[in-house]
Image (spheres, rainbow, N blue to C red):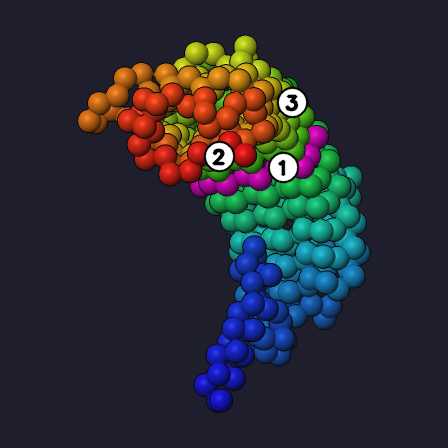
């Protein structure tokens, strides 16, 4: 029985830690007592002295951060303001700043706070009330999360010197296409951009050619620019579901690019299957108005080496059934193990 008890304990401990994966965070109680170099309202575990945990404390402002702190966790508080001077001891050492789930507005972010952090690598600023981004001067910034705010603009130039930035998450805001014009033009290493749940009328312009993931679900997009994807030779995953796309808004060959592996066009107003490249593996077209199955959308011609690599195709909630697939599709779609109509 003893080995079973040990196994169950380890399993439960692992499950308890899963909820902190977003921040690579572990509960203070599991990290031991707090060290002396710490703000009295927070905890700085002795065996992890460079981290200060101030989360879930009902704090209304950011406490003064002592020297030596590199990772600061302030999520799940009642913070309304960031006063000048709180980061003076760590302007060139703080790497992670987590401010998620607070009540911060731009008016209450004083000068001499975020604008002085020159070493920051991760800024998590989701679930607050900011209307425009607060960007640190750090050239080391790798990850920026400002989800679930009230962002209505993202001026160009804010990310120009962010040479290490790889991920930007801005979903659930109030951004328009005009508000983000050339906002992401600077970072040449950007891999992932999420602008879903906003008010975009078109895919963001001026994104770097390094981009591999672009999520623009739940917007008002009604057309794809001709040649848009040709400018993104590394793009592998594109999601434009829950928009207003019609056949007339998709130029011929718009999605016929070799890099793309996943394309989500579900919950739009398409009546036909757009042309895709033979390298595409996942295609989601459910909940459109598609009424015909054109094999030329998948294969221009079929041969020993010329066939679609498509593995999963969703066509449920459209106006076609499995009987609409032509018999010769077996050669073209020879790798498709999952084609859904219902």
Tags 2 and 3 touching, CB below 8 Å: no
Marking on residue 220: 3
Secondary structure beneath label 3: loop
| Residue shown at 71% from the left, 39% from the top | 149
Residue receiving disc 2: 340
Mark with earlier residue (1, 3): 1
For the residues labelled 1 and 2, the Cα–Cα distance comes to: 29 Å
| Residue 166 part of the magenta-drawn span | yes
| Residue 86 part of the magenta-drawn span | no
| Residue shown at 62% from the left, 65% from the top | 52
Give x and y (percent) for residue 47: 53, 75
Q: Nearer the viewer, mark 2 or mark 3?
A: 2
Residue receiving disc 1: 171
147 over 16 or under it: above or below: above
Q: Residue furthest bottom?
A: 2
The C terminus: image quadrant: top right
């Amino acid at each position: 029985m003893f080995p079973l008890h040990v196994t169950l304990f380890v399993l439960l401990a692992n499950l308890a830690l899963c909820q902190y994966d977003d921040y690579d965070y572990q509960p203070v109680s599991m990290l031991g007592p707090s060290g002396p170099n710490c703000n009295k309202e927070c905890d700085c575990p002795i065996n992890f002295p460079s981290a200060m945990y101030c989360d879930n404390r009902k704090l209304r402002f950011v406490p003064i951060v002592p020297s030596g702190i590199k990772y600061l966790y302030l999520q799940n508080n009642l913070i309304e303001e960031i006063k000048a001077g709180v980061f003076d001891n760590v302007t060139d050492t703080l790497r992670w700043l987590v401010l998620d789930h607070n009540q911060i507005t731009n008016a209450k972010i004083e000068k001499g706070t975020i604008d002085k952090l020159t070493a920051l690598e991760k800024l998590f600023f989701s679930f607050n009330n900011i209307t425009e981004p607060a960007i640190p001067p750090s050239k080391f910034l790798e990850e920026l999360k400002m989800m679930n705010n009230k962002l209505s603009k993202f001026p160009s130039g804010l990310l120009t010197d962010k040479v290490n930035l790889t991920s930007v998450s801005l979903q659930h805001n109030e951004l328009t296409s005009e508000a983000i014009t050339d906002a992401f033009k600077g970072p040449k290493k950007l891999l992932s951009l999420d602008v879903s749940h906003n008010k975009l009328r078109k895919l963001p312009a001026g994104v770097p050619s390094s981009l591999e993931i672009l999520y623009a679900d739940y917007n008002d997009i009604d057309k794809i620019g001709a040649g848009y994807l040709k400018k993104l030779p590394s793009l592998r995953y594109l999601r434009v579901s829950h928009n207003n796309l019609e056949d007339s808004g998709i130029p011929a060959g718009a999605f016929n690019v070799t890099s793309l592996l996943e394309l989500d066009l579900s919950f739009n107003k398409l009546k036909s299957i757009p042309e895709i490249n033979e390298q595409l593996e996942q295609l989601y077209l459910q909940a459109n108005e598609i009424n015909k199955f054109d094999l030329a959308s998948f294969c221009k011609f079929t041969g020993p080496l010329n066939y679609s690599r498509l593995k999963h195709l969703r066509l449920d909630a459209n106006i076609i059934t499995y009987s609409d697939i032509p018999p010769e599709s077996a050669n073209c779609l020879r790798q498709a193990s999952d084609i859904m109509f219902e």
